[in-house]
Amino acid sequence: MSRRRIIIDTDPGVDDAAAIFLALASPELDLAGISVVAGNVGLAASVKNACKLVALAGRRDVPVYAGAAGPLIRDQVFGKYAHIGSFADTLVPETDHGPQAVSSVRFIAEEALKAASKGRRITICAIGPLTNIALALRLAPNVAQGIERIVMMGGAFASLGHRTPWSEFNVHADPHAAEIVWNSGVPLVLMPLDVTFQALFTEEDFRGFEAKGSPCGSALAALLRTYDRSDIKRFGRPGGAIHDAMTIAWLLQPDLFSGKEMAIGVTLCGPTAGQTWADFYGKSDRRPNALVMSGVDERGYRELVVERIAGLALTSGEREIDA
């Protein structure tokens, strides 16, 4: 089986934990490393969370890299639960696993350049602010040529925002980075709030994560119960989204999703900085730069995420880090 080589660029984050676990549970994917950026929480807490997650999954062979501690230009903003910091040890056990000495930016750039030289490009799953990726693209002119596509969770169109009334958090946190990445020429697949809000996970799913006794499934269920994301007033029914895992799910089962190519952009400054727009009906002269998802098979997506994560780290022992 030919495995797709990917990098996850992340700011863990409960949703990020689900995406990382889903990738680690999927033999179709070859996870080259986890690149960490400040976002949901500060950089130190984000790195600690990422290390805890790979250690719990028995995958210390997957290296973790620390990247940008703040956005390119704008004042820094954090996620809803930033004051809590890293995951409590009672939710995700402590570990002595630590990050690599190389920065995320250099790691992304070097992986892309190496992939370009071998003719086998990498895929980046971007589930945090895009600062690391923007910096990597600027580090060398050929970096973009080594990236097959960037699958990103970000943006909001018809659904409006969740971090502010007009913006989704990952773009809001660094709109200038989004502008660089979205106009880099690298093919982009976008999972905006419009589609992530269509699939809501409930207590039934949490019990599904725990059903096989996986430590990862149990930890994710505990995180989801602790950091509740339900909003019946907005969604009209119980449950909450697991946004970031959609990037991994699209790589595994793209037929679960529907969308179309279109031009997208972002407001860089002013009172609505971070607001995203999409030319749904071809009204502008801008060429499409993203495949924007607008629909998801909710049941299929939920079943994929629950089934894979429920079985993670049940039989495989820890792998050694390659020298």
Image: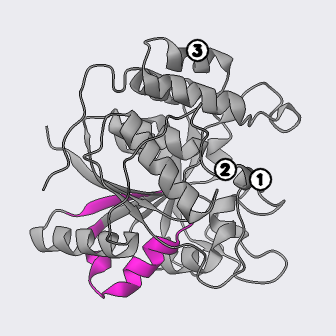
Q: CA distance from mark 3 to mark 1?
A: 26 Å
Which mark, residue 193? 2
Residue 90 x %, y %? 59, 31
Q: Amino acid at mark 2?
A: Leu
- Of helix, strand and loop, which one carries label 3? helix
Range of magenta residues: 121-147
Q: How far is mark 3 from mark 2, CA to CA?
A: 25 Å
The amino acid type found where label 1 is placed reads His
Secondary structure beneath disc 1? loop
Q: Are marks 2 and 1 in contact (CB under 8 Å)?
A: yes
Residue 58, x across and y down, in percent: 31, 34
* Disc 1: which residue: 162
Assess disc 1: are there few (<14), some (14-19) or many (≥20) residues with their C-alpha within 10 Å of its C-alpha: some
Q: Residue furthest top?
A: 211
Q: Amino acid at mark 3?
A: Arg
119 to the left or right of 128:
left
Disc 3 marks which residue? 207
Q: Earlier in the sequence, mark 3 or mark 1?
A: 1
Which type of secondary structure does the marked residue at label 2 adopt?
A: helix
Which quarter of the figure has residue 69?
Answer: bottom right
Q: Position of residue 299 (x, y in %)?
A: 55, 23
In this rendering, is residue 317 above or below 175? above
